[in-house]
Amino acid sequence: MKKLNIGLIGCGGRMGGHIKALLEMEDVAVAAVADPIEERRLAAAEKFGCTRIYPGFAELLDHESKATLDALLIAIEPTAHGDCELRAVEMGIPFLVEKPMTVDMELAEQINARIQETGLITAVGFQDRYLNVMEMIKEELPKHPAGGLVYGSWVGGIPGVWWWQKKSTCGGQLVEQNIHLLDGLRWLFGEPLSVYATCSRGMVTPGVDASEEYDTDDHSTAVFRFENNVTATLVSGCYVQKTAPLSVRPNCGLMISLRDTVLDYRLRNNLIIKTADEVRDIAALKDQTYKLDRAFLDAVRSGDPSGIRSPYSDAIKSLRLGFAANRSMETGQVIDLK
Ligand SMILES: NC(=O)c1ccc[n+]([C@@H]2O[C@H](COP(=O)([O-])OP(=O)(O)OC[C@H]3O[C@@H](n4cnc5c(N)ncnc54)[C@H](O)[C@@H]3O)[C@@H](O)[C@H]2O)c1
């Protein structure tokens, strides 16, 4: 079978997960890599014996083409996207881009419009949609049409990357990190009717607990109303001390309380299903990045995008929702989404 030639854009933390997945695939060759940090681009290239190595996506796209690359994987910081995806669309090269696809909503809309016009195959890194335990929740919910309550949380410390420290460069924790659970809510319950959100600062001291420029929310709470009597509260927090032991770190995930069943999804770890008759504890398979990448690459090979669970056109709805929650935090208003 002819190998698919892939270009890697951004060789930081997240690309490490994609590289691990690609190394397990026999039908894939990494033909080009780009990152401004030399050490990172060289390390990524070495793993695949790749010799086309560029200092950034601009140079990669200047020298490569649809004839030399079948697909791109893009994992760069949210403010670094520039014209990367727009150029990929014009060149006709399918891409998988990490969430949040940018913090510039206008740019995301522009990219999405061109994708719709050209029909390019795209995927976004909402890896949780490929988790066995999330699939089980999705299968279970239609059996409970009466609705219920959802308590979701992602509470931890502050990730080390520089761009996470400022709300303007990461979008805030809900847009940057908890967008995974926000997207999960959309995947499980459909499009919300409204969102109301609050946020708080003052727990984390810039220059002491975080970098000098830290100015993002320490925690936020967003309430999403869905059809069919479902209301979800999603809390995001990044104030837990770096040195805090596991015993003082709260559980993260989604607790879905139905009339006769509890679905307790522990973030990327396990799902506990409780009914009157039994308690089942199902382990997450943790192969979701492999499945995400495989779904995208299979679509590139076959031309059939139906296996991609989060194309750009769907992922942008999660991005819009995250920014709608941010607007609610700023204005104190409920944002009507219908
Ligand atoms: N899907 C997930 O579960 C998941 C997990 C972690 C991070 N992410 C997302 O992946 C993205 C990257 O996060 P990260 O943790 O890898 O960040 P990172 O800072 O570790 O890596 C980003 C890399 O992009 C490079 N880069 C910057 N400008 C570039 C350019 N012009 N051309 C090529 N490379 C460039 C940087 O030098 C850096 O090495 C973010 O959007 C983040 O939210 C997704």
Image: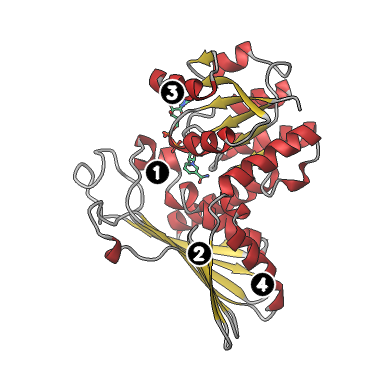
Q: Earlier in the sequence, mark 2 or mark 3?
A: 3
Q: Which residue is mark 2?
A: 270
Amino acid under disc 4: Leu
Q: SS at mark 3?
A: helix
Query: Is residue 248 depicted above or below 21 in this figure?
Result: below
Q: Which residue is mark 3?
A: 43
Q: Quadrant of the C terminus?
A: bottom right
User: Quadrant of the rendered structure where residue 144 is?
Assistant: bottom right
Name the residue at the top extreme.
63
Q: SS at mark 1?
A: helix
Q: Which label was assigned to residue 167?
A: 1
Q: Which label was assigned to residue 60?
A: none
Name the residue at the bottom extreme.
276
Q: Earlier in the sequence, mark 3 or mark 4?
A: 3
The image position of residue 200, as x and y in percent, is 34, 58
Q: Is residue 175 left or right of residue 295?
A: left
Amino acid under disc 2: Asn
Q: Nearer the viewer, residue 139 or 155?
A: 139
Number of the front mark, 1 or 2: 2
Q: Earlier in the sequence, mark 1 or mark 3?
A: 3
Instruction: For marks 1 and 2, give the CA distance.
Output: 31 Å
Residue at left offset 56%, top offset 33%: 23
Number of the front mark, 1 or 3: 3
Q: Which residue is mark 4?
A: 141
Residue 91 visible within the image: yes
